[in-house]
Image (tube, coloured by chain):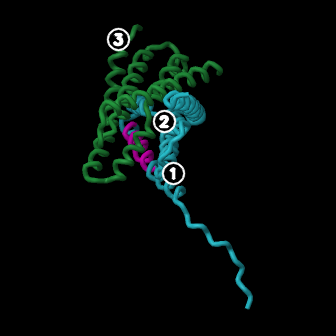
Amino acid sequence: MNQQLKITLWVALGGSLGTLCRFTLDLLLTQPTSTWLANVLGSFLLATFAGLTTTRTSTHPSQFGLTVGFCGAFTTMSTLMANTASLYNANSPTAAALYLAASLSIGLLATFTGFALGKYLAKPRPPQPAHTPPKKP
Amino acid sequence: MILTILMLSIGGALGAVARYHATQYIARRHATTHFPLPTFIVNLTGSAFLGALFGILHNAPTDPTQSPLYLLLGTGFCAAFTTFSTFALETHTLLHNSTPKEKSAAAAYVICTITGCLALFVLCYSLASLTAIT
């Protein structure tokens, strides 16, 4: 199978799973909280993966399923805007501004933390010397 | 229940695949070094489309967010087509490589994405709700 087709199929699979997970959060927490949490969690996951694979050169098509597919579809910019607009309409401009600010700041914070975590986990460690019991004199 | 899952899966898969191919296409045509143009354009387009969808469904008699059409096109397609995680990671990458030029590109990217997407959402919502057949 050609590489582009493989990637496309993985992205489709990841995209539908990401959408279903986001909708599950909608049912559990209701919008706009669910969209905020999905964006934060998805950003953290994508950044962790990016940190883990930062030194790798080879990519498997399934990686696109996780990054472009799952993380990309789990998080959303358009619903964030819809929620901001409806908060502005229904509640108050302050709530809308706070929602937007909380999405941006915590989302970026999750990205920085995730990337650092991924990089830390990927760091090759020197082999630990085998534990030797202290010699008795 | 089955219909909901089916609509979300189809919409989500199509949205993600459309995003992948759109970003690849834009990246091939416009090799920009500092500004992540592909994701920017995709997020603008998706927000505009969702705004128009909200506007069309504005006068629906029942809760429009529960209709199968909205699950397919809104929660499925538009939401999966646009992405927050890639936007955040690209901002991180620009800040991480921090030459002054890239730092200002990161600031411009965040500001342009947020204001652009919000403005297009509101604009398309207003236009579509004006023209929507009631």
Is residue B2 a member of the stretch shown in magenta? no
Where does the image place residue A86, in percent across and percent down from the top left? 42, 29
Numbered circle sitting on residue A52: 1
Residue at disc 3, secondary structure: helix
Chain shaded cyan: A
Cα distance, mark 3 to mark 2?
Answer: 35 Å
Say which quarter of the image contains residue B91.
top left
Instruction: Tell me which chain the residue with mark 3 is part of.
Output: B
Is residue A108 a member of the stretch shown in magenta? yes
Where does the image place residue A62, in percent across and percent down from the top left? 56, 37
Chain shaded green: B
Query: Disc 2 residue type?
Result: Val
- Residue at the (36%, 26%) spot, across then down: B45
Question: Between residues A60 and B104, which one lies in front from this camera angle?
Answer: A60
> Which is closer to the viewer, label 3 or label 2?
2
Q: Which residue is mark 2?
A: A68
- What's the magenta region? A96-109
Where does the image place residue A61, in percent across and percent down from the top left? 53, 36
Q: Say yes or no: labels 2 and 1 on the same chain.
A: yes
Residue at disc 2, secondary structure: helix
Numbered circle sitting on residue B131: 3
Looking at the image, can residue A34 be seen?
no
Looking at the image, can residue A121 be seen?
yes
Quarter occupied by the C terminus of chain B: top left
